[in-house]
Image (cartoon, coloured by chain):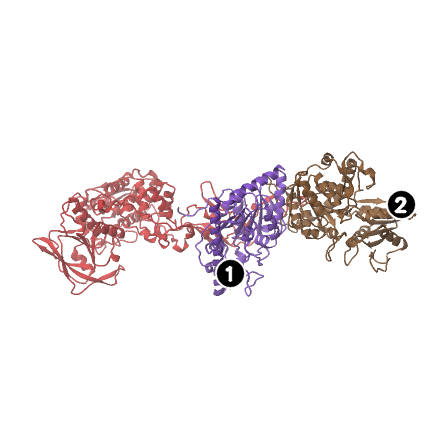
Chain colours: A red, B brown, C purple
């Protein structure tokens, strides 16, 4: 290896000097471990039910490729403008940055990307295939699950037809979420995008009513995604969660009593529910908060009664156990909604057919229940009565499955489905809030639709089931935090409380470009290479190369396997693997 | 020839004749050779060289960088650095300074750099001595340097000029030795040649191998056993080649400047001599007087002046051996545990020769002990009176010596 | 702000295939130095790891000319080389002596001091791996207190503190002095680029971790160097004219224990010795701080850095010499 190539002394130069580069020496043979580039899964991706490739689209945002970023989201979620506003963003809860300073504001970036593309249409290439398949699939319900399923089927080349009972598409997105959280133009735009990809939506088409079930037989598969649109009765809710029985819906028929779903439906369809001065909302979920904040606006918008402090949310447990999105609770509080914790309604007392009082009972927290939350236990002899003229009950929703002709396997009030959303009836799939294991969120519905589309694809024989690859999720201690100076999380802009509580206009605004870019820069991009060059920078063997497209390759002829690149990678996008020993 | 003869001071090549010390003769030669980088550290009795050069450079008479280093070791390192860049480099030292340089003498030769150094021969300590003997330079015999010993201040100047020509031809460094005080601090008339003629004789050096960003090489890195030996053979070969180069340069010099020193060895009455004494440096001048006197009395004695010690003039000595019956060697040095160094080398040169006269090895003049014509005559007498030497070292002038 | 990234000069002058151990800090130092210096550079390398790293004849990794010189002659050989280039009319090529701590702090120190005093016009880069590594980990005067080496075994680890080479060189009042680390390549490159623009003697002290010598896994090379900076073991500094001290990076001051615990050479240390080391670091930092404060005061009263004028002086002196 180190020999001069001269064979005779005459050929040799008079003194020893180099004539070639060490590049000819294959020092890679010293190596016993080999660095490789290997992208891993970020915890936020795992945390996102829709499975959005968050680090990937963040990188596109970083490069100001906003359209590309949008397309990336669209692969998993056709409704980023919606989820960017209303998602409870479990992704952020998993964010590794949480352990360092504050989680990255992923939710706001999603919205930023969607809003940047408000005037764009999804491109042809968002489709997985150019091949149009002959199979047709019916989707019942145009809520997030139905839209997501139909959309993914369309991407796969299927003809998908959505049957929607209501007059407009969107399901709960349209009828259950107030405008100040989700303006209708956003929803309309994204539904329009889905339609533009070839999805047909038949509105005013309630299966089992004006459309016979039999019509669905011309389809090769059906996806049931009718959601949970019916409010639970207060008494039912109590019975479900407490050993005490109150008898039959005491006072439930009085004037001034609404269910949360009814109340929001009326508002969202242009109605104006009559409410009084003292509004009580029962429940701790998002519907309760939406109803409370809407009631606040309703009073104010009429301009006749000063309502501040007159909308109170009653909840059986404490704030910590509330299922509503914490930001929404904070917002409600900012706007003046009051909270009364550890109380449960016993009965509503009327006067002349109208609500006048409610009897409540004090609760205390006991042992954790199946949901992991501490169970409310009534305190004996703690009943008391407060004044009220409007009571909105928002203690949960359930599906209406009365239209289903077959004896579908049900669990409780929902359609029982397998992991792949199959119902047991061949070709019939179900998902979203209508099916078992829902969590009542938009993003979980989107996930269900996506998964069901894949299952239908399999069912129709176009795709073979793939064994899931075990995800390698990047842990917080694997991040090389040296590379990330502490930085504050972006605060989303909002209109003033004074303004927000006075109308149904959207409260939260989109991040400015500057804010979004700064926030994206906070992202560790766990497990996804950002081509930051740290690996190259610290290679003592000059064995990491970058091609004209900015992609790295490792020169294994010279890499000695020191592992600095892997150790220094800020985001765990590389790893060292054992080299197979070769005996010369 | 007549190096010291008046006629040598009249020649068209001469610019002027000055009366200067041996150290300054070296300095003038450096100026004439248009040396570009000088790095030196002062040591008695070399100081005259650096003082004069400092003057010359600061007057602008020589466009050179003079690096006033903090040691002889750094002096040689700086010369090596300058030389590998392609510049003509010079240093001067003596005795302890030369010993300190030792490692870098190998470095200069191994790097095949034509550095020229003037060494004022001074005895090594302890005990401290500032006077002449040759152990300092002869201790460096295996470093790969050519070694010249000068007899006069004129020869110092002429040899420095020849030395660059030789060094640059064979890519080896050259050391020119002159005796402490006897030459270094003694003023003699010295003919300074015309600069333009020196320029013709010694054009600027064009280094074949040098550090050059436009053509990057690494010099002197590790070599394995598969190449080191060849590298050493190349150096050996260069030293062998140097013999012919020395002869040629001397005759070219003679043609141009009218002075010659006989190449490697200069003989004096050796053609018809029966006994010849080999010696070097200023002892040669003294020996010339002794020979003149003994010849006038009819003794068939002669003299061989050893001008180069490296390369050792094997051929010249063998040729001498064919003509004479006895050879004496006067060493102004001693190799402890052996003999005088030149005596050893002479013996070695003759061992495989067809004719091998008797050899007598004399040690004299150590640490500045005077070597007078009488001292030399004593040596001739000893040779003539004995068929074989009674011992391998015959110390001459030693107090309480049984030898007189 | 976002992630820390490094914008280094793109050209790779150092070639792969060199003979450095995996994870070598001294090699990264060379890679960055060459990026900062460019191709018009000549390296003078005395005996040190780089004698081997650059490759045996007929190979070389450096990509620029290299002169391998004797152990103690980096500064003196570089002095001569620069003089030689100047005499041949080359005023552009940067001459760089690139030496280890042994060749700098110890055996080459005399030549270095001489060159510094003469304000020779070259850059001296010392890649400090805190012991004689090329010969197999023997202590040098750059080895820190308490460290194991083959000549300071764990039963009697090094009892003396590391020589403060920076203060010694500052006392020579050379125009530019900087300390840097391979964990901060941007800092290192900026300092060498700055040094390149200054004439006269410039000294760059590079903290260069050695996995086999310090006994840690090669992959931790950068992490350990970073910890040395963060724990104030090795301050990142610039000193202009030997008097004007500037801190390049204010470290967090993490406990030195964390730094020591990562390295096998400190494994034998008792808690008490670690405390002693911490105390020394704290005291040294206080001393440094007082220098920084007085430098600042002087700068303010001078109405600007002294160094600038000095540099002009050096350039002028160089020009004057050239005219001769």
Q: Nearer the viewer, residue A494 or B382?
A: B382
- What residue does disc 1 label? C264
Q: Name the residue at the left extreme.
A: A352
Q: Is residue A347 left or right of residue B344?
A: left
Mark 2 surroundings: few (<14), some (14-19) or many (≥20) residues within 10 A: few
Residue B228 image position (x, y, % from top left)? 67, 50
Q: Nearer the viewer, residue A434 or A397?
A: A397
Q: Is residue B72 left or right of residue C284?
A: right
Point out the image quarter for the C terminus of chain C. Answer: top right
Q: Is residue A404 visible to us here?
A: no
Q: Name the residue at the right extreme.
A: B298
Residue A248 image position (x, y, % from top left)? 13, 58
Q: Is residue B201 left or right of residue C295?
A: right
For the residue labelled by badge 1, is the local secondary structure a helix, a strand or a loop?
Answer: helix
Q: Is residue C167 left or right of residue B175?
A: left
* Total marks in image: 2
- What residue does disc 2 label? B272
Q: Is residue C133 visible to us here?
A: yes
Q: Nearer the viewer, residue C273 or B345?
A: C273
Mark 1 surroundings: few (<14), some (14-19) or many (≥20) residues within 10 A: some
Query: What separation in Å lies between label 1 and label 2 (alpha carbons)?
Result: 80 Å
For the residue labelled by badge 2, is the local secondary structure a helix, a strand or a loop?
Answer: loop
The chain that hosts pointer 2 is B
Give above or below for A422 relative to C272.
Answer: above
The chain that hosts pointer 1 is C
């Amino acid at each position: 290896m180190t020999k001069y190539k001269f064979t005779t002394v005459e050929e040799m130069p008079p003194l020893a000097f180099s004539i070639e580069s060490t590049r000819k020496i294959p020092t890679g043979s010293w190596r016993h471990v080999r660095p490789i580039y290997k992208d891993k899964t970020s915890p936020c991706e795992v945390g996102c039910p829709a499975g959005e490739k968050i680090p990937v689209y963040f990188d596109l945002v970083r490069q100001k490729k906003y359209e590309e970023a949008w397309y990336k989201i669209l692969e998993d979620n056709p409704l980023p403008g919606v989820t960017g506003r209303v998602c409870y963003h479990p992704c952020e809860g998993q964010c590794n940055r949480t352990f360092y300073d504050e989680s990255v504001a992923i939710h706001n970036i999603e919205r930023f990307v969607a809003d940047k593309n408000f005037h764009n249409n999804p491109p042809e290439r968002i489709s997985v295939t150019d091949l149009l398949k002959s199979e047709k699939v019916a989707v019942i319900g145009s809520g997030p699950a139905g839209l997501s399923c139909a959309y993914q089927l369309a991407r796969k080349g299927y003809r998908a037809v959505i049957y929607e009972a209501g007059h407009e598409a969107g399901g709960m997105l349209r009828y259950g979420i107030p405008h100040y959280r989700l303006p209708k133009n956003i929803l309309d735009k994204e539904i329009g995008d889905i339609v533009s990809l070839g999805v047909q939506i038949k509105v005013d088409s309630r299966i089992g009513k004006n459309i016979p079930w039999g019509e669905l037989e011309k389809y090769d598969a059906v996806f049931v995604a009718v959601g949970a649109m019916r409010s639970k009765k207060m008494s039912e809710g109590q019975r479900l969660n407490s050993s005490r029985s109150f008898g039959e819906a005491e006072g439930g028929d009085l004037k001034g009593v609404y269910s949360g779903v009814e109340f929001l439906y009326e508002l969202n369809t242009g109605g104006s529910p009559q409410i009084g001065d003292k509004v009580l909302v029962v429940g701790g979920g998002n519907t309760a908060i939406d109803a409370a904040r809407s009631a606040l606006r309703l009073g104010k918008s009429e301009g006749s009664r000063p309502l501040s402090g007159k909308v109170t949310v009653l909840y059986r447990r404490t704030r910590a156990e509330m299922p509503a999105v914490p930001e929404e609770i904070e917002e409600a509080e900012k706007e003046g909604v009051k909270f009364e914790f550890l109380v449960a309604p016993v009965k509503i007392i009327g006067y002349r057919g109208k609500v006048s009082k409610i009897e409540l009972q004090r609760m205390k927290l006991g042992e954790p229940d199946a949901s992991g939350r501490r169970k409310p236990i009534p305190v004996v002899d703690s009943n008391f009565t407060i004044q009220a003229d409007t009571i909105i009950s928002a203690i949960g929703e359930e599906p209406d499955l009365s239209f289903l002709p077959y004896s579908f396997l049900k669990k409780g009030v929902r359609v029982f489905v397998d992991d792949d959303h199959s119902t047991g009836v061949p070709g019939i799939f179900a998902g979203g809030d209508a099916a078992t294991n829902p969590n009542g969120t938009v993003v979980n519905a989107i996930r269900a639709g996506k998964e069901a589309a894949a299952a239908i694809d399999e069912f129709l024989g176009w795709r073979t089931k793939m064994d899931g690859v075990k995800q390698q999720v990047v842990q917080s201690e694997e991040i090389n935090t040296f590379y990330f100076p502490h930085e504050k999380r972006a605060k989303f802009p909002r209109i003033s409380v004074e303004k927000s509580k006075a109308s149904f206009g959207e409260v939260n605004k989109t991040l400015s470009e500057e804010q979004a870019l700064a926030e994206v820069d906070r992202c560790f991009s766990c497990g996804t290479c950002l081509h930051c060059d740290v690996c190259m920078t610290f290679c003592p063997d000059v064995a990491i190369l970058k091609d004209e497209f900015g992609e790295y390759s490792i020169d294994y002829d010279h890499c000695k396997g020191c592992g600095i690149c892997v150790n220094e990678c800020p985001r765990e996008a590389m790893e060292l693997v054992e080299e197979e020993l070769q005996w010369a | 020839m007549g190096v010291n003869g008046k006629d040598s001071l009249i020649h068209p090549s001469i610019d002027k004749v000055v009366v200067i010390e041996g150290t300054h003769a070296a300095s003038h030669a450096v100026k004439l050779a248009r040396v570009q980088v000088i790095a030196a550290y002062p040591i008695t009795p070399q100081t005259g060289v650096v003082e004069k050069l400092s003057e010359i450079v600061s007057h602008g008479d020589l466009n050179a960088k003079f690096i006033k280093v903090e040691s002889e070791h750094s002096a040689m390192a700086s010369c090596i650095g300058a030389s590998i860049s392609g510049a003509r480099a010079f240093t001067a030292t003596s005795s302890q300074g030369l010993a300190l340089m030792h490692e870098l003498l190998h470095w200069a030769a191994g790097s095949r750099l034509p550095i020229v150094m003037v060494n004022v021969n001074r005895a090594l300590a302890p005990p401290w001595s500032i006077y002449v003997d040759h152990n300092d330079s002869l201790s460096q015999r295996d470093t790969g340097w050519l070694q010249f010993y000068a007899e006069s201040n004129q020869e110092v100047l002429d040899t420095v000029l020849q030395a660059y020509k030789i060094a640059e031809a064979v890519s080896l460094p050259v050391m020119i030795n002159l005796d402490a005080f006897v030459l270094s601090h003694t003023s003699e008339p010295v003919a300074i040649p015309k600069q333009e003629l020196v320029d013709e004789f010694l054009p600027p050096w064009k280094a074949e191998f040098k550090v050059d960003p436009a053509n990057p090489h690494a010099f002197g890195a590790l070599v394995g056993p598969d190449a080191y030996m060849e590298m050493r053979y190349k150096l050996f070969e260069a030293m062998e080649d140097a013999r012919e180069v020395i002869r040629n340069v001397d005759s070219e010099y003679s043609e141009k400047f009218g002075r010659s020193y006989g190449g490697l060895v200069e003989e004096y009455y050796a053609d018809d001599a029966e006994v010849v004494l080999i010696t070097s440096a200023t002892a040669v001048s003294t020996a010339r007087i002794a020979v003149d006197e003994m010849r006038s009395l009819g003794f068939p004695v002669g003299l061989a002046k050893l001008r180069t010690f490296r390369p050792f003039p094997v051929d010249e000595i063998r040729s001498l051996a064919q003509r004479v019956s006895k050879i004496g060697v006067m060493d102004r040095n001693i190799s402890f545990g052996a003999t005088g160094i030149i005596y050893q080398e002479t013996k070695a040169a003759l061992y495989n020769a067809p004719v091998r006269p008797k050899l007598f090895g004399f040690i004299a003049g150590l640490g500045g002990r005077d070597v007078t014509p009488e001292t030399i005559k004593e040596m001739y007498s000893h040779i003539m009176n004995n068929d074989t030497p009674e011992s391998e070292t015959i110390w001459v002038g030693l107090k309480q010596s049984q030898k007189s | 702000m976002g992630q820390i990234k490094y914008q280094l000069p793109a050209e790779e002058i150092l070639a792969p295939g060199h003979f450095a151990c995996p994870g070598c800090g001294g090699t990264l130092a060379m890679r960055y130095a060459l990026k900062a210096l460019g191709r018009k550079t000549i390296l003078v390398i005395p005996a040190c790891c780089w004698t081997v790293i650059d490759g045996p004849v007929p190979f070389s990794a450096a990509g620029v000319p290299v002169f391998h010189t004797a152990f103690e002659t980096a500064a003196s050989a570089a002095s001569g080389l620069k003089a030689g280039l100047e005499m041949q009319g080359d005023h552009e090529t940067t001459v760089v002596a690139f030496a280890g701590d042994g060749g700098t702090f110890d055996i080459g120190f005399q030549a270095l001091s001489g060159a510094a005093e003469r304000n020779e016009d070259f850059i001296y880069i010392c890649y400090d791996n805190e012991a004689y590594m090329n010969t197999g980990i023997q202590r040098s005067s750059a080895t820190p207190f308490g460290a194991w080496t083959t000549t300071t075994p764990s039963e009697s680890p090094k009892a003396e503190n590391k020589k403060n080479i920076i203060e010694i060189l500052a006392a020579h009042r050379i125009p530019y002095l900087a300390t840097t680390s391979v964990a901060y390549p941007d800092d290192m490159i900026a300092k060498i680029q700055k040094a390149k623009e200054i004439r006269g003697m410039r000294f760059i002290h590079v903290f260069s971790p050695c996995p086999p010598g310090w006994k840690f896994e090669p992959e931790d090379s950068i992490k350990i160097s970073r910890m040395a900076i963060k724990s104030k073991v090795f301050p990142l500094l610039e000193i202009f004219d030997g008097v004007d001290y500037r801190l390049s990076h204010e470290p967090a001051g993490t406990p030195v224990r964390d730094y020591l615990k990562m390295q096998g050479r400190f494994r034998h240390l008792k808690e008490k010795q670690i405390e002693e080391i911490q105390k020394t670091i704290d005291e040294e930092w206080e001393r440094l701080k007082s220098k920084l404060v007085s430098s600042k005061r002087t700068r303010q009263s001078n109405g600007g850095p002294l160094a600038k004028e000095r540099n002009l002086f050096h350039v002028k002196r160089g020009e004057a010499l050239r005219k001769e």
